[in-house]
Image: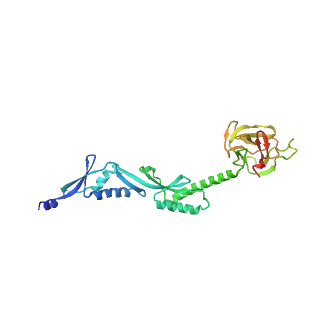
């Protein structure tokens, strides 16, 4: 009889407190903790919430309260938001171990990678990978919609494919006395070959002439150090590059020189511009390769 009277007048509730501060009352502990997770998920837009943890666990105390007492679950949830540690899950898309975009779900990541593999069947050396990631810093999340992410990844695929193509081309290039020739200095028409005689010179031709318009950029064929960049008689404006191992390349008749003695250069750097200075009948590059000071036929290595 007494219990019945008590239950008519009172109801069981849980008092919730953190750090000794009472936050209010809830009717069901399990439902309340589920509501916390649901509230976080609903406020996280498209972000994937992996887990929600409380920095300090609330203390629950079962009490009998007046039946007219209103519980305040939503207000308590709002009050403990600063006490939550939220872990987000997302997926990076990496091309040859370099991350270039992120999406929210594994399904989106797999869709993106499968589409890219179908679109890039010829790029067998490209490694497309999905990396599962976690963060508690919402600012680190920079996930994108699938189509936007796909565009970003495809750009990186194209970039990596071009790098691979260049590396393959370099691998095919010859080496001189252990020095890899990575690029041709210019593209043009061979106008005078090594070793030929001419009334323009006292001896046979010591290099290779490649005719191309004035101003055409001249690239250094391999890494090295500039040992000369000045006017040199019949050579006109002459740039000399020391590549090590006794290998030196000369670039003559230039209209402009963009380097100075002592400067380090890398294969493919533009060091001068084609011209017709010195003993020249028209714009061209006179290109020489020398080993330990002796000129050799450049066509044994380039412009075959």
Q: Where is residue 281 in the image (x, y as percent from the top left)?
A: 82, 46
Residue nearest the viewer, comparing 238 with 276: 238
Left or right: 285 as drawn, with respect to 65:
right
Most distant residue in the right direction = 199
The answer to whether 295 is drawn above or below residue 9 in the figure is: above
Q: Quadrant of the N terminus?
A: bottom left
Q: In this view, does 210 lie above or below 259?
A: below
The location of residue 108, given as percent across then percent down, is 48, 61
Whether residue 89 appears in this view of the structure is yes
Residue drawn 57% across the image and 63% down it: 118
Q: Looking at the image, what colour scheme do you see?
A: rainbow
Answer with the quarter of the image where residue 73 lies. bottom left
- Whether residue 253 appears in this view of the structure is no
Estimate the x, y position of residue 21 in percent, counting from the top left: 26, 47
- Nearer-the-camera pick, 128 or 136: 128
Give the x, y percent position of residue 192.
82, 48
């Amino acid at each position: 009889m007494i219990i019945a009277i008590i239950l008519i007048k009172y109801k069981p509730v849980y008092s919730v407190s953190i750090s000794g501060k009472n936050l209010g009352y809830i009717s069901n502990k399990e439902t309340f903790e589920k509501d916390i997770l649901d509230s976080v998920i609903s406020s996280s837009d498209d972000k994937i919430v992996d887990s929600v943890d409380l920095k300090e666990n609330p203390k629950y105390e079962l009490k009998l309260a007046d039946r007219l007492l209103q519980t305040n679950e939503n207000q308590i949830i709002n009050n403990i938001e600063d006490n939550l540690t939220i872990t987000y899950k997302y997926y990076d898309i990496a091309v040859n171990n370099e991350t270039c975009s992120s999406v929210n779900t594994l399904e989106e990541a797999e869709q993106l990678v499968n589409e890219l593999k179908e679109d890039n069947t010829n790029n067998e050396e490209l490694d497309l990978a999905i990396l599962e990631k976690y963060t508690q810093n919402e600012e680190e999340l920079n996930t994108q919609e699938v189509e936007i992410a796909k565009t970003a990844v495809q750009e990186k695929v194209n970039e990596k494919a071009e790098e691979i193509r260049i590396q393959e081309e370099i691998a095919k290039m010859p080496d001189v006395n252990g020095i890899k020739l990575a690029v041709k200095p210019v593209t043009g028409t061979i106008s005078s070959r090594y070793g030929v005689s001419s009334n323009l010179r006292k001896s046979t031709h010591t290099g290779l002439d490649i005719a191309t318009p004035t101003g055409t950029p001249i690239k250094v064929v391999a890494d090295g150090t500039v040992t000369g960049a000045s006017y040199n008689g019949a050579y006109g404006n002459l740039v000399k590059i020391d590549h090590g191992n006794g290998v030196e390349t000369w670039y003559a008749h230039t209209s402009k020189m963009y380097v100075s003695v002592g400067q380090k250069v890398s294969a493919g750097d533009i060091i001068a511009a084609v011209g017709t200075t010195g003993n020249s009948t028209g714009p061209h590059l006179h290109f020489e390769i020398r080993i330990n000071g002796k000129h050799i036929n450049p066509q044994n290595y380039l412009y075959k």
